[in-house]
Image: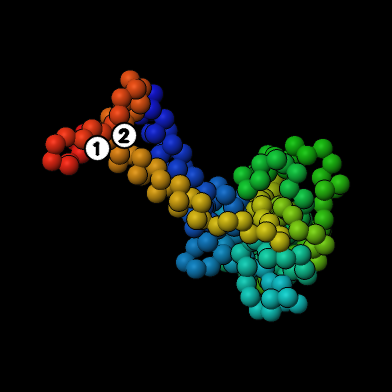
Amino acid sequence: MRVQLAIRALLLASVLSTLALPGGAVLGHGGVVEEDDACLIRISYLKAHFKVYQPRSAGHTEYCEDLPEPAESVFVMEYLHDEMGRVPLEFRIIENVTGKGRFARWEDIAAIDDIEAVTVFYREPAIEPHVFTAVHEFEAAGSYIGIVTARPDTGDRRHVAVFPFDVGYTGAGVWPWVVGAVILVQLQYLWMSGRLRRWLTARRIGEPSLKVVPGGKDED
């Protein structure tokens, strides 16, 4: 029973993990998601096409978030809501010191004692009527968090998008998840077919899982 529960728990963890993958991964990637082959940043109800360029090293190649190397990087937001061109937009990049990696959220950032000490780039709130751009040259590879803040003229209210990203390291991609899922599915199949249970029972009582009978055939 304990083995069965453990396998089911592993399968559930696998399903939950896939929700954090870059294809559908609002939880893994904060305010930036991929939708219809385009990268979108969501700042509350406000949306914009989001892309990053490294013109000196990669020419016109577009990146959603992760960047292949420390270099001059151009962040671009093309508005999908006219309101974004009428409200001040603030942009900050900090070192990811939250300990949460890809799962860092605004609450984790707000808990940082001195955000200025970990800030590597800051652009004061400004109104950009048509498209927002910011240029920063990363000096070192590492994990960072981008923070975009829209400040509508509604008192102290503000809308924030948070997107963790890596520079100089893109990770192993989705393959570890694929391999893990295949292994878990195979374990589930063996358990449902009874083979894994018979093998575990044989191991527990100290008997071989297979025995040879006359005729050269194996019998469970």
- The residue that label 2 is drawn on is 196
Q: Are marks 2 and 1 in contact (CB under 8 Å)?
A: yes
Looking at the picture, does residue 74 appear above or below residue 193? below
Label 1 sits on a secondary structure element that is helix
Looking at the picture, does residue 122 appear above or below residue 133? above
How far across and down, in percent of the image, does residue 179 sit?
A: 45, 51
How far across and down, in percent of the image, does residue 190 sit?
A: 30, 39
Residue at image location 36% in from the left, 40% down from the top: 187
Label 1 crowd (10 A; few <14 / some 14-19 / many >=20): few
Residue at image location 46% in from the left, 39% down from the top: 13
Looking at the picture, does residue 130 appear above or below residue 26? below
How far across and down, in percent of the image, does residue 29 sit?
A: 59, 52
Quadrant for the N terminus in the image: top left
The amino acid at mark 2 is Leu
Q: Which quarter of the figure has residue 49? A: bottom right
The amino acid at mark 1 is Ser
Looking at the picture, does residue 179 appear above or below residue 219? below
Residue at image location 82% in from the left, 37% down from the top: 113
Quadrant for the C terminus in the image: top left
Residue at image location 49% in from the left, 63% down from the top: 35
- The residue that label 1 is drawn on is 193
